[in-house]
Structures are given as structure tokens and as C-alpha cells.
């Protein structure tokens, strides 16, 4: 990425972040929703750990609580129906209009979505720390929690890139409404949002570990739960590179199609 591209991308992120902060009602709703969700899910996991002899797949009640706090923050910070929104914009011709700009359509949209997500992510992280401290006490590992911070940012970048790659199907099928439902379930289960991947059956655990969805929720959860595994950040970065290539290729092909058929 050139210096000029980096600058306009940073400007786009900053502008979107300021707008997100100004929408106080929406931000308050997101944080309230996050708080309710994590209080309920962490309580269920703590009960499961207590009934299972103190641990679940090697995670004790404290580790499970901090895992969920991070994995949920990585997903709640995003628009759950982003694929549908992008698909509708493609079908309506909004993306065709955006193609008239000199900047990349995908790049502009990624900058805007990352900017919108960062304030929500920061708010969810703050709420999560409060919930964790009041329910189970100190984090299992301060180093793990520190690593989970960049992991959360990388998680939303990976998630957004994958959603745009999925949504690009609308260049051909004109409707991505059903795609988002399948995608979210993949993130929920194979991405480790609802449960650590170690709780899955052996074969499914192996499959999930080899897919990009694990970079979107499992990695920040795993780190926040006390597992100091810095190599997971490298895994996230690698998946981001792959997903960026897939999304860019899909959008480039879709834009060529729009130009060929006249929108």
C-alpha cells in the first residue's frame, strides 16, 4: 500500500469513527446488547465448567468468561447483516456509482466499516473488562489480554474482508440476503464465537482450525483466556492477506461485469 493510499485510508477510518461516536444512541444500544449477551453466555459457561469438574476442554470458569468477553466483542462490534447491506448496494447500483471515484470501492468501504467498528469495539472491550472483573476477577494472564487487543482489531478486519468477499456474489446473483445467514453461522461455530474450538469434536476442530473464520473470534478469545500464543497474530495476519486478495479479486471481477453490462 502506497503512502498516499495509506493516508486516504486512515482519513476514511478516522472520519467514520468520528461519525460512529456521534451516533450515541446506536453506540449505547450496541454496548447494552453486548453486556446482556456476555452476562448470559458467560454464566452458562461457568455453570458448565462447574458441572464438568471445574473445566471444559481445558478452560476453567475464569478462562471461559474472558474467552467469551473477547470473542463476542470481536463480532458484536460489526454490523451482523453487512453482507446483506453490501449485496443490496450492488444490486441497487450504488456500487456502480461509487466506481466513478478514483479510489478503490473495496478500499473505501473497508475504511468506512473499520472506522465504524472501532468505537464499538473499544466500548465493548471496556464493558467486557468491567463484567470480567466483577464476575470472575482478574484476567488469567495480563500478557494474554494485551495480545488480545491487536487480535481484536485484526479480527474485525478479517471479518469485514470475508463479508465483502461473500457479498461480491451479488454482482452475479443480485441477491445476497441468504448468504449472510450462512456466513454468520460459520463465524458462530467454526469461528469460535460461541464456544472455544477445543470443545468441538476432533475432526471438526481440525477443520475449523484450518479455515479463516477462526481468525475472527477464536484468536482474541483464546488470547484473552490466558493462552499467551503470539503466533496466533501471525495466523490472523496471514488470513487477512488471503481474504484481502479474495475480496479484491471478487470485486474487480464484479466491477468489470458491471462495466460490461452497463450497471
Image (spheres, rainbow, N blue to C red):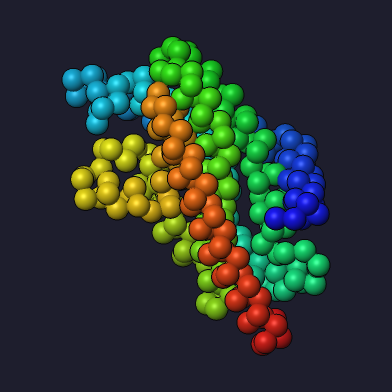
Location of residue 64 by image quarter: top left
Give coordinates of residue 155: x percent, y percent.
52, 43
**Above-or-below relation of 116 to 63:** below
Give coordinates of residue 181: x percent, y percent.
44, 58
Location of residue 45 by image quarter: top left
Q: Which residue is painted at 53% across and 20% down in the image?
A: 129
The N terminus: image quadrant: bottom right
The C terminus: image quadrant: bottom right
Q: Which residue is painted at 48% across and 52% down in the image?
A: 239
Left or right, 134 with respect to 85, comes to: left
Count the labels in the image.
0
Q: Which residue is painted at 52% across and 47% down in the image?
A: 237
Give coordinates of residue 99: x percent, y percent.
75, 71
**Above-or-below relation of 63 to 175:** above
**Above-or-below relation of 111 to 50:** below
Left or right, 22 with respect to 152, comes to: right
Give coordinates of residue 20: x percent, y percent.
72, 40
Instruction: Decide if residue 251 is in sight here.
Output: yes
Q: Which residue is painted at 54% across and 37% down in the image?
A: 152
Location of residue 117 by image quarter: top right
Left or right, 156 with respect to 198, comes to: right
Residue at the far bottom in the pictured view: 261
Amino acid at each position: 500500500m502506497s503512502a498516499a493510499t495509506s493516508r486516504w485510508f486512515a482519513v476514511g477510518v478516522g472520519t467514520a469513527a468520528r461519525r460512529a461516536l456521534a451516533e450515541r444512541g446506536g453506540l449505547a444500544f450496541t454496548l447494552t446488547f453486548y453486556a446482556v449477551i456476555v452476562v448470559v453466555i458467560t454464566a452458562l459457561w461457568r455453570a458448565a465448567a462447574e458441572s464438568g469438574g471445574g473445566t471444559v476442554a481445558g478452560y476453567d470458569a475464569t478462562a471461559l468468561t474472558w474467552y467469551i468477553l473477547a470473542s463476542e466483542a470481536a463480532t458484536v462490534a460489526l454490523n451482523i447483516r453487512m453482507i446483506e447491506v453490501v449485496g443490496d448496494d450492488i444490486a441497487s447500483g450504488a456500487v456502480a456509482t461509487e466506481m466513478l471515484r478514483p479510489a478503490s470501492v473495496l478500499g473505501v468501504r473497508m475504511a468506512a466499516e473499520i472506522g465504524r467498528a472501532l468505537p464499538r469495539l473499544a466500548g465493548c472491550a471496556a464493558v467486557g473488562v468491567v463484567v470480567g472483573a466483577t464476575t470472575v476477577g482478574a484476567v488469567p494472564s495480563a500478557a494474554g489480554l494485551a495480545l488480545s487487543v491487536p487480535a481484536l482489531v485484526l479480527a474485525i478486519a478479517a471479518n469485514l474482508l470475508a463479508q465483502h468477499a461473500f457479498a461480491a456474489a451479488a454482482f452475479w446473483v443480485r441477491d445476497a440476503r441468504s448468504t449472510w445467514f450462512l456466513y454468520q453461522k460459520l463465524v458462530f461455530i467454526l469461528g469460535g464465537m460461541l464456544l472455544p474450538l477445543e470443545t468441538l469434536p476432533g475432526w471438526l476442530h481440525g477443520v475449523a482450525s484450518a479455515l479463516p473464520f477462526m481468525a475472527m473470534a477464536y484468536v482474541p478469545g483464546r488470547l484473552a483466556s490466558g493462552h499467551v500464543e503470539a503466533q496466533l497474530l501471525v495466523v490472523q495476519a496471514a488470513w487477512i492477506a488471503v481474504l484481502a486478495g479474495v475480496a479484491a479479486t471478487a470485486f474487480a471481477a464484479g466491477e468489470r461485469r458491471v462495466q460490461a453490462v452497463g450497471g
